[in-house]
Image: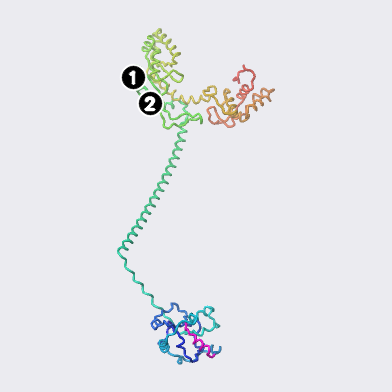
Amino acid sequence: MPLSRSDTIDLDDYDFDEEEYTQSQATLPPSSQLDVIELTDSDSEDAIQSQPPPPSSSPQYGVIELSSDEEDAVTQMRPVSVASTIAVDADSDDDLPSMDQVLNEYRNRPAVPRQTSFGQSSKRRYSQGAADNPSGSDDTPSPPKKSRLYSTIKTSPSPPPKPKKRTRKTPEEKQREKEEKDAAKARKEADRKAEQVRKEQEKLLKKQLKDIDRLKKQEEKDAKQAQRKANNRHADKKKALEDMTIVLSSTFGQHFVELLNIKMQEFGASVETSPSRLQGYDCVRFRRHIHRQYDTKVRAFVPVDPPFDKEEPAVLVRLSKETLFDLVRNQNLQQLVLTLRAAYNLPQSSQTRIFLMLFGLEKWKKSARHKWQIIEDELAVLQFDEHTHHIYVESDQEAVDRLYNVAADYGIKEQKLVERSYLPFCPNVKIEAAKGKGTYCQMLDQVHRLTISAAEGIVAEFPTMRELLDSYHELEGDPKGRERLLQGSAVKQRQDGQASARENRRLGDVLSKRVATVMYGSDPNELVVKG
C-alpha cells in the first residue's frame, strides 16, 4: 500500500533490526518539504487512514520515534561524510522495504512499556529542534537520530464536518419564546409611543412659549399705545366730551331729550335717562368715563384697567319762573337745595356743585320788575349760603347749549387741574425732605415762578446753601452782579414737568434777581415780584 502524507510510522525497540542502519542525506528531500511520521502504540490502520490532512499546502512534517535501544544502535553506525550527504542520491528505492511489509511488522510486534525508567516518555520531536532555527537554511542541524523524515507523504483536505442536527423545541419553549417576543414587541411599542408623546409635549411646549412671547410683545405694544393715548392732551373741550354722559331724569320731555341727543352726538357724548331722586323736579347728572388717571410720581397719565364710570359731584335742577317765585314766596328755596344735597349725597364743600337752571327770568325783568327783584335778592342770599351756581336761559335750545358747556367743562376738568398743579403758588401738600439737600431744593422751589427743575439747576451749581450765601457775600459791593449770579443756571424741564424743547435753557435775569432778593435781601418790606 503506498504511503500517504497522513500515515504515521512508529518504530520501537522490537521493530528495530540489529543490523547497521545507514541512510544518505542525499536521499532525503529538502527540509522545507519534510513530513514527520510518528507511530505510537495506539495507532491502528483505521486511524492511520482516517487522519485528516492539514488544510494548507505548505510542507508537513512526520515524526518517527525511536526507542533507547535503537538510539544506541544508530550511535554505532558509521559516520557519514559531508560530501556523501550533499551528493545526489542516484540509487533507486528498490532496496527499501515496501509499505505493506512495514505495516505488517508494525502490527505483529509485541507490546512494550511506553515509560522509561525515569517515568517519562522517551519520545523526542524534531519540531523542537526546528523551532530553534526557524530560518530553514541548509546549515540547519540534522534531525535527531530517532526521527525519520519523508517528503513524499502528502495530505489531502478532509471533508467538512457534518452539521449537527438541531433538537426540536418543545411547545412550552415555543410558547415562552412567543411570550418573550410579544413582551419585547410591547416594550418597543410602548417606548415608541412614549417617545412620540415626549416629542409632542416638547413641540406643544415650544408653541406655548412662542405664543407667550408673542402675547408678551403684543401686551407691551398695547401698553405703549395706551400710554401714548392716555397722555394725549385735550386742549379742546369738544375732544373731552367723548368721555362724558349726560343723565336726564325721566320728567324731561321727549322734545328736549331729542334736542340734547342731536347736540351731544355731534361730539361723541351720550345721553341717558333715569328716574329722578327728587319727585316733581327735572334733575341732570354728569357721568365721566375713567380710562386714565394722573400719577404724581411719574408726572404723567397712566391707563386704568379696567376702566370705570364715575359720577361727578354735581347736580343741576331746572326751574321755571313760576315755580321759582312760589319757592321764594314760601321761603322754600333754600330747603330745596338742602333736599337736593341729601338726595344725591352732595355735602356742602368746595368739591360739590349745585346748579339752578332758571327759565324766563329775563322777560320778568322788563314786565314784572317787582317779582324779578324779589327773586334776585333771594338768589343772592342762596348763593352766599349754599354756594350755588345759577344759569339763566330763555329756550330749550339755549338750555341744551348750556348743558353742553357744563359737560365739556367737567370733561376737561382733570386736564386743567393737572396743568395748574405745577404752579408754585397753589401748594396743597406738606413738603417733606429727608436730607439737607432736599430741604435746600424745596426752599428754592417756594420762590414765585421758580420750578423744581430750575431749583435743581441752582443746586447743581451751588450744592449747599452756605456756598450760595458765600457767593452772594463776595458780591456785597456789586448789587448788579449779585442779581445776575444765577442767570446761567440750567433749566431742563418746563413747568408741566416735560423736557424743555429748547437746548441750553437758562434761568434768566428776572428769576436770578428774585432768588437773590429772597435769599439775601435784608428789607422785609421789599416786593419780591417786582422784577
Mark 1 neighbour class, 10 Å CA radius: few under 14, some 14 to 19, many 20 or more: some
65 part of magenta stretch: yes
The residue under label 1 is: 251
Residue 512, how many percent across, how many down? 62, 25
Residue at figure coordinates x 60%, y 18% from the top left: 527
Which residue occupies 36% across, 54% down? Answer: 190
Residue 97 lies in what quarter of the image? Answer: bottom left
Mark 2, other Cα within 10 Å: few <14 / some 14–19 / many ≥20: many
| Residue at the extreme front of the image, as rendered | 117
- Which residue sits furthest top? 370
Which is more N-terminal, label 2 or label 1?
1
Where the C terminus falls, by quadrant? Answer: top right
Q: Are marks 1 and 2 in contact (CB under 8 Å)?
A: no
Q: In which quarter of the image is residue 458?
A: top right
In three-dimensional space, the C-alpha distance between marks 1 and 2, rounded to whole angstroms, equals 18 Å
Instruction: Mark 1 vs mark 2: give the one in front.
Output: 1
Q: How many labels does the image show?
A: 2
| Image height of 439 relative to 109, above or below | above
Quick one: quadrant of the N terminus? bottom left
Q: Badge 2 is on which residue?
A: 270
Say how the picture is coloured: rainbow
Amino acid type for the residue under numbered disc 1: Thr
Q: In the figure, residue 524 lies in which quadrant?
A: top right
The kind of residue on which mark 2 rests is: Ser
**Does residue 41 show up?**
yes
- Above or below residue 214? Residue 306 is above
Residue found 46% across the figure and 88% down from its top? 16
The magenta region covers 63-78
Q: Nearer the viewer, residue 505 or 168?
A: 168
Residue lying farthest right?
477
